[in-house]
Amino acid sequence: MNMNMNKITIPVYMSLTTLPMRLIHSKTQKVIRSILNSTIQPEKIIINIPLRTLKNHTYPLHLLHKAPFTHPLIEIHYVEKDRGPILKLDGILDYLYQHQIETKAIILIDDDILYPPHLLEILWKYHLQKPNHSIGFTGRKWNINQEQLILKSYIKKNIEKPDFFPCDLLETFHMVLHPYKNFKNRYDE
């Protein structure tokens, strides 16, 4: 962990996608500011923008050249293929592979939810306790799979005493953390 701007930087890359209308109405900007106001900070926040969107719509690119997008932690990543909702994950994996970056974890976030300042710190704390598991706040349980855990107590607003439980599908609602090692061989196949 590094100290930067009086905050601890954890070895995590965050990823999100956004839509032109959310930029125009400043929703994405508010989300980015909420992450930048976290008690700890990631190494980078990657915003994945599909090139198809730029060609098919009037995209407000000028907004990406203003605060908070000019913050040193923010990087815009233009991607060839728009894979819909999976772009948050696919885009960050592509970015890390292209730049030959190793990190401990990736965190997927939504572009329309404001995050409390301590949420990233809490997620990181529980990742350190369960470093081989994906951890999130919303999921579905079909069959037991010990590789994905949900901080069930977050929903109950009691995040100091988590109640982990296994699930089959973690949803990206709020935040979800995945150990990078679970994906880093993706391009070796």
Image: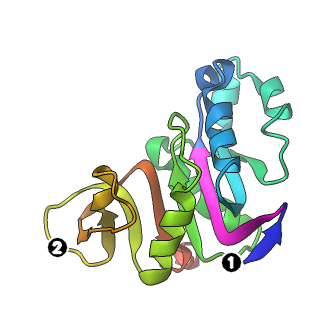
Asked if residue 75 lies left or right of residue 178, the reply is right
Residue 42: quarter of image: bottom right
**Circle 1: element type:** loop
Sequence-wise, the earlier of marks 2 and 1 is 1
Query: For the residue marked with disc 2, what is the amino acid?
Result: Ile
Residue 70: quarter of image: top right
Picture residue at 63% right of the left edge, 42% below the top: 34
Magenta-span inclusion, residue 149: no
Q: Nearer the viewer, residue 122 or 107?
A: 122
Please tell me whether residue 96 is drawn above or below residue 117 in the rendered image.
below
Q: Which residues are magenta?
A: 6-16
Residue 158 horizontal/vertical position (percent):
33, 57
Residue 72 horizontal/vertical position (percent):
85, 52
Picture residue at 54% right of the left edge, 47% below the top: 116
Residue 57: quarter of image: top right
Mark yes or no: residue 49 visible. no
**Circle 2: element type:** loop
Crowding at dot 1, Cα within 10 Å, few <14 / some 14-19 / many 20+, comes out as some
Q: Nearer the viewer, residue 154 or 185?
A: 154
Residue 176 horizontal/vertical position (percent):
45, 58
Quadrant, the N terminus: bottom right
Identify the disc placed on residue 144.
2
Asked if residue 1 lies left or right of residue 184, the reply is right
Q: State whether the magenta stretch is mostly helix, strand or loop.
A: strand
The residue singled out by tag 1 in the image is 102
